[in-house]
Image: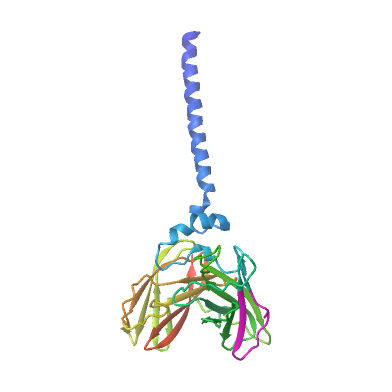
Amino acid sequence: MLTSARPIARRRALAAAGTAVVLTLTLAACGSSTNSSSMPGMDHSAKASSASVSPSTDDMPGMDHMAAGNGLTDNTDGYRLTSKDMALAAGKQTPYPFTVTGPDGKPVTAFAVDQTKRMHFYAIRSDLSGFQHIHPTMAADGTWNADLASLAPGSWRVFASFRPDSGAGKGTAFVLSRTVTVPGTGTETPLPAAARTAEVDGYTVTVNGEPMAGMAHPMTVTITKDGKPVTGLEPYLDTYAHLTAFHQGDTAFAHLHPTTKVNGDHGGPELSFNAELPTSGNWRLFLQFQTAGTLHTAALTLNVG
């Protein structure tokens, strides 16, 4: 009896050990799957994003800090974008006054210089047409005034991009936004199909690369004119190009800067980017570059997988 029982007991022990190994691997796999902060394209809470993503992007040129988020809120970490204007006139230049208040509820008046400006202000129509990028002026009391060019009737979203130079948010990149209505009868402009090239003022802009949602991915922009490479790009906002992107459907915001080193008025023809667009779908890209003192804005639709 004792002789025959020993192999049985041994087999049971080995089976139990095997079960334990399988269980351990299963738990490890479950633990890995719950750590979604390392998985590109996943939706995370603001707390998880700031803890796991921001530090890794701070030292990477050409990328915005994740603290800026997608810009689809008028308040973050106690900072709020406020304005008394909920509607703006159509068909003419229109001033848009606004204020950024801090965690203490008071208007912020100290802003750090970012790309030669203390405030970058954007306007985009809900159909992703009518893009405007403005550098407003601030009064001593902290009231900013953005002079918007003629607006077509419809729903618009305006964005303020800035870095406080004092207080709890000192040095942090913020992008806050509000929606405004332009009264009147307007028609929605269909989003142009995704394309790799765009024409503006005789220049051809070509985008190469396959950005994936939530991942930093190399992307290049090449600028030519009459089939010849352009090598006379001038610095604009301390770089050779400024690229702003808006997501179709919710107008989520992102903006990217070239990693290409600035060397006088000799930029181009190719500019490199670390492109990180947070969600999949169609993005409308607006690339601004300067030649011979003239600013050009090229627009194209990019599909992100």
Outermost residue, front direction?
Answer: 140
User: Percent position (x, y) of residue 59?
Assistant: 40, 62
Location of residue 186 by image quarter: bottom right
Between 228 and 2, which is closer to the camera in this rendering?
228
Q: Which residues are magenta?
A: 82-99
Outermost residue, bottom direction?
Answer: 92
Is residue 181 positioned above or below 13 on the image? below
Is residue 82 positioned above or below 17 on the image? below
Q: Main secondary structure of the magenta part?
A: loop
Q: Is residue 95 visible?
A: yes
For the point 46% across and 16% down, the residue is 7
Location of residue 136 by image quarter: bottom right
For the point 36% across and 82% down, the residue is 234
Location of residue 236 by image quarter: bottom left
User: Percent position (x, y) of residue 238?
Assistant: 40, 77
**Residue 86 in magenta stretch:** yes
In the displayed structure image, the side of residue 295 where residue 253 appears, left or right: right
Between 95 and 289, which is closer to the camera in this rendering?
95
